Amino acid sequence: MSRLIIEGGRPLDGEIAVQGAKNAVLPILAATLLNSGRSVIKNCPRLSDVKKTVEILKELGCRVKQEDDVIIVDSSQLGSCTICEELMRQMRSSIIFLGAIIGACGEARVSMPGGCEIGSRPIDLHLKALAQMGVDIKEEHGYIYCCADNISGADIHLDFPSVGATENIMLAAVLSDGLTVIRNAAREPEIVDLSRFLNRMGARITGAGESVIYIEGVERLYEAEYTIMPDRIAASTYLLCGMITGGRVAVKHCVPEDNAALISALRTMGAGIRTERDIMYTYPVKELKSPKLVRTMPYPGFPTDIQSPFMALCCTAKGTTVFVETIFENRFRHVDELVRMGADVRVEGRTAVIRGVKRLFGAIVEARELRGGASLVTASLAAEGKSVVEHSEYIDRGYENIERNLRALGADIKRVKE
């Protein structure tokens, strides 16, 4: 276990370069199984989830080499189609290997995935889509067994624009026979990034980033090099850290357009924010006004992954905000910890009502999942006195060296490990 100790009340000041995107690198690493050769993936963030993904690749028989932020995967000796229960349970995103293994091997055996306990994330959409593509699926004793003599193109309509289901269909379809159409597909920028990498290897995918994606199956894929997109959630989090402390922070090497929903919400608050081609700036203002309503939605709506850190900012704004969480039912697990710090928050089901307070106070709080942990760090930076964020290992799943980055901006923060 590790904890972050933060002495709050210091305005942040300086520049920070954004890491590669967690939600893009994981499916792209899974996709390296498909070319039976060498893939060079650049701008890979140093995250615990990336480390676990590399372990899965090695278990499947890949040779993996990592040099700084470059991961080189050689899948020419792929010798297994099974991922053990221990690795699958460590992170929810491990399910993305299902489509890749089926595409590469024609069969797969994986256990039900684990990860942060932020709510049920059923994989029925994944399995229903794969079945439409001719995959025979059996579920026994917590394991999923998939087999396909021939993966066929299909016209698939998703009941919900699931990111994971969209990615799994893409991974299974690139080497299939015929044309696969995904309707009501997820539109997240990470879907576009996966599409670009697959096309770099020789896939034929069009429409990524729109609600309908077309995948024309090809006979084989080829070796490729690719650079991971910037992490829009990390960029937004550091922007909020600067804003809640009344600081001046430049978030560099980002894509402001990917953060349009957050930027719009901040501007309704009267926040000091300015954007350029690949930079977001925050500067202090006299007073922030609470937005009336924040409703999480699939992209391009307000992202559920930034809801928690944004709530920390709203806790210190003037007025009342109603948060409605439409994606995960347990996304408010950080609220009790914010209340420990003096926040005024009431929760009923998937709705939280936040009344802004003049100040937050340091406290011992517990991170229970990734984004909730980031929310507590954000709040602690602005709180009076010392805060201790327990179980900061959750935060390491999505933020590379968060304490080092914040120290570079002037924060008084350190990590203690047991």
Image (tube, rainbow, N blue to C red):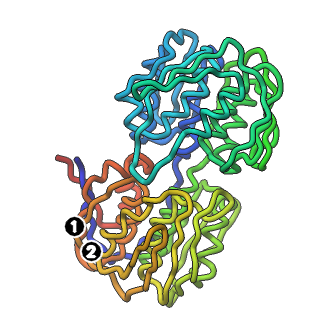
Q: Amino acid at mark 2?
A: Arg
Q: Which residue is mark 2?
A: 340
Closer-to-camera residue (9/330) = 330
166 left or right, relative to 396: right
Q: Which residue is mark 1?
A: 364
Is residue 21 visible in the rendered image? The answer is yes
- What is the CA distance from the residue labelled 1 to the residue labelled 2? 8 Å
Residue 209: image location, x then y, percent: 75, 48
Is residue 251 visible in the rendered image? The answer is no
Marks 1 and 2 close (CB-CB < 8 Å): yes
- Residue lying at 31% horizontally and 58% vertically, measured from the top left: 367
Q: How many marks?
A: 2
Residue 214: image location, x then y, percent: 81, 36
Residue 281: image location, x then y, percent: 58, 70
Residue 375: quadrant of the picture = bottom left
Residue 31 sits above or below residue 322 on the image: above
Q: Earlier in the sequence, mark 1 or mark 2?
A: 2
Kind of element beneath mark 2 = helix
- Residue lying at 77% horizontally and 15% vertically, measured from the top left: 219
